Amino acid sequence: MSAVRRFPSRMSGGVYFGPADWRAKTWAIAPTPIPQTAAAGVTAINNRDTLLALVRRVGLGKTDRVTPALADQLELLGQRPVRLLVLNLLPSQPESALAAALTDLALAHLRAGLTLLDMALRAKQQLVAVDRHDQRTVKIWRDLAPGHNLGVKALLGKYPLAHPLVLLRVLCRRSVLNYAAPAAAGLLVVDPVTCWALGRAAAGEARFTHRPVQVVVQGLEPVLAMARIGEPLRDLFTRLGFPTADMECIAGGMLSGQLVNPADAVIEPHTDVLALRPSPRPEPSADCIGCGWCVQACPTGLNPAAILAEAGMHAAMPLAHLYEAVGCIDCGLCTYLCPSRLPLAATIGNIKRSLTAIPAAQAAPAPSSLSAQESI
Ligand code: SF4
Ligand code: SF4
C-alpha cells in the first residue's frame, strides 16, 4: 500500500482560517513500518506502557508550551490511535547558523527519539511542522524523514513567530482553547527536544537534566547553549559572557515570551529561547480607538479591549470579562497589533496570574556531566 499523506492544503496566511471542518479533512493514514535502524536500547520500547515508563524514568517535564507533559498526554490519550505532531522545531535563526551547529550526535539522538515514538505509538501519521523561516531546518527534517515515515510541512512565512498554540490553530484550522485540546483530538504534540531527550535516554539512560537553549542578544550572534534545568538564568548568561546590567530578559521568544528577572528565573524544561536586549523606554499609549484588531487576532476568542477596559474601571471587582483572562495563552498578538500601543497582553497576563495558581518551577536534579560531543 502506498503511503499517502495529506494535510489541509489550504493553509492560512495568518491566524485566521475558514470552516472548522478540519476533522473531516482526515489526515491520510500512512502505514508505519518499524524501522530496523534504531539506536541501541530503542528496540525495547515497542508499546505505550514501556514508552510511558521510559518517559517517567527520563524525567521529561513539560517540554513545550503547547501541551502538558508527555506522560500526561499519553495518559490522556490512553490506547487511542494518535497522530504525532512535532512542533516548534530545531532552534534556528533565519540565517541557519544555529541549525548548522547541531552536532551529529544530537541529530542521532533526535532520530532515535523519533524512531522510539514511531515504534511505541504506531501513529496514524507523523508530521513535522516547520514554523521558522529557515530552509536549512526544513532540509534537516527532510533528511531525517525518509527513514522515519515523517511528513514535513513547511510553514515558512505563514506563521507569525508567536505562541505554539497559534501555530497549532493554523495547522488544525480550528480554535485550540486549552492545553488539553490536542490530546482530546487524538493528537500527540511534542517538540524536538522531547524527541532528542528520549533518544538520548534510550541510548544511554541519561536523565533529562539539560536542554539546548537558544540565547539571542541584541547586536550579537545568537548562541545555542546546553543549559541545566534549574540553572539560574544569571549563571547561564555569566557562563556565556553576556552582560545583564541594564538589559531586560525575555524567556520564550520576543513576541510571546515573558519578561523575567535573570536573578530569580531559572531554566525550565520548556525554556527554549532567551533574549537579552537593552531595557526599552516605555512606549506611550493612546486611548483605544475601537478598531477591533485585538479581538480579531486573539486565537482563543477573547476580547482583549474589553478585558483591559474592565481592568481599568473595576480593578477591585473582577467582572465577567476579567475571568475570561484565564483563557489567555500569552501569545502577544493583541499587543503586537494594537495601533494604540496598549499593554494588552501584559495586563491580561497579570490578571490571569492573579486568578490562577501557577505551578512552581520544577527544580532539576544536580547537574550531570554531558559528553563534550553532546554540547551544541
Ligand atoms: S488576549 Fe492577547 S495575548 Fe491573550 S491569547 Fe488573546 S491575543 Fe493572545
Ligand atoms: S487593538 Fe487596541 S485600539 Fe484596537 S480595539 Fe483593541 S485595544 Fe482598542
Image (cartoon, rainbow, N blue to C red):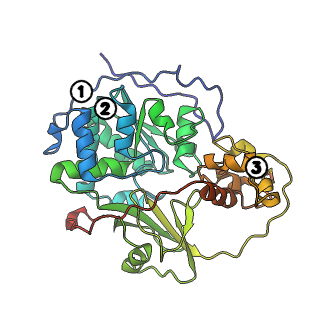
Residue 17, can we see it?
yes
| Residue type for callout 2 | Asn
Quadrant containing the N terminus in the rendered view: top left
Tell me if mark 2 has few (under 14), some (14-19) or many (20+) residues whose alpha carbon lies within 10 angstroms of its own.
Answer: many
Element on which disc 2 rests: loop
**277 versus 208 height, above or below:** below
**Label 3: how many Cα within 10 Å (few below 14, some 14–19, many 20+):** few
Asked if disc 2 and disc 1 are in contact, CB closer than 8 Å, the reply is yes
Q: Residue furthest front?
A: 317
Q: CA distance from mark 3 to mark 1?
A: 54 Å
Q: Which mark lies nearer to you, 3 or 1?
A: 3
- The response on whether ligand 1 sits within 8 Å of label 1 is no
Q: Is residue 112 visible?
A: no
**Under 8 Å from ligand 1: the CB of mark 2?**
no
Give the left or right position of residue 297, taking residue 189 as reference. right
On screen, residue 295 above or below 124: below
Q: Which residue is mark 2?
A: 149
Q: Which residue is mark 3?
A: 319
Of residues 259 and 132, the one nearer the viewer is: 259
Q: Residue furthest top?
A: 1
Amino acid at dot 3:
Leu
State whether residue 332 is above or below residue 1. below
Quadrant containing the C terminus is bottom left
Other-residue count near label 1 (Cα within 10 Å), few / some / many at <14 / 14–19 / ≥20: few
**In this figure, which residue is indicated by the disc labeled 1?**
33
The tag earlier along the polypeptide, 3 or 1, is: 1
Q: Nearer the viewer, residue 19 or 92?
A: 19
- Residue 323, how many percent across, how many down? 68, 48
